[in-house]
Amino acid sequence: MLNDTLRERAGLLATIRNFFQTRNVLEVETPVLSKTGVCEPYLKNLTTNISNQRYYLQTSPEFAMKRLLCAGSGSIYQISKAFRDEEQGSLHNPEFTMLEWYRVGFDYHQLMDEVESLVCSLMDVTEFSRITYQQAFLQTVGIDPMRVSYTELENIAGSVTGQTTKNDLLDLILSDKVLPALPQAVFIYDYPANQAAMAKIRNDVAERFELVINGVELANGYSELTDPVEQEQRFINENKQRETMGIKPMTIDQNFLAAMQQGLPECAGVALGFDRLLMLVCNKKILTDVLPFPIENA
């Protein structure tokens, strides 16, 4: 069983590399360690110390890859380890493999096309659907997520423990009630502007998408924000949110902002959970079934 999984993993990696080679997308490597972490309050970096200097293990290679884009790399991809200090579960392991790529000159719709082509080359998916975030909620639970009140969301979500924001409740309803009612493979796009992450915002919606297959959130992508001033303000806002939540603010990555000031080309990028993809390909239900060494056995 282990050997079968190892061979399947190796085969997927080879197919992915061939996919990007035929499209002239350059494979790159960037450091796993950085002197700064992420400001995003819902992502928690793992850390280590080297010569009394704290370093952060990457939650994704996004910042470093965008620095390469600003330096003129052209379209690039990377298969790398990422680390997140979060609650473990059937779809989470603190150390995992991520496929991330950026396509210069693409918008998020063109990138959805490419994600679909890649996934079709790796697994048997007969049909992909596309639906906006707003339409997904309207069709399944009958609410408009852009205008719904907190009280209405509480009524739909049911009993929830702990402090929750409106976005927390939307995420819960999306996972528990919306996704199970959608097709096997679906792109959900045009997220609320306050869930933009690092995506461009157009007409109060974020040019962002997620690919969900059999209820598993597989990929998250967007038309990339290229304005360094807006990017810095988003970091500042995230740190304010961290303080509100009782979390220590994170030092903003000035190397990344300096690179953006030199000019991030118009592009779209996506991060895809490779281990989750392997899990789907192997018809497994939990991530540990496809990891040679899950954290408990590392």
Image (cartoon, grey):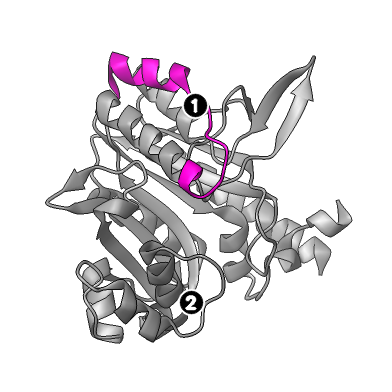
Can the viewer see residue 43 in this picture? yes
Residue 127 image point, x, y percent:
34, 75
Characterize the local packing of mark 1: few (<14), some (14-19) or many (20 or more) Cα atoms within 10 angstroms: some
Question: According to the image, label 2 marks what residue?
Answer: 214
Picture residue at 58% right of the left edge, 70% below the top: 280
Is 247 included in the stretch rendered in magenta? Answer: yes
Question: According to the image, label 1 marks what residue?
Answer: 64
Residue range (magenta): 242-264
Q: Is residue 48 above or below residue 153?
A: above
Picture residue at 27% right of the left edge, 67% below the top: 133
Is 46 included in the stretch rendered in magenta? Answer: no
Question: Between 85 and 73, which is closer to the camera in this rendering?
Answer: 85
User: Which residue type does callout 1 highlight?
Assistant: Ala
- Which callout, 1 or 2, points at the residue further toward the start of the chain? 1
User: Which residue type does callout 2 highlight?
Assistant: Asn
Residue 6 image point, x, y percent:
75, 57
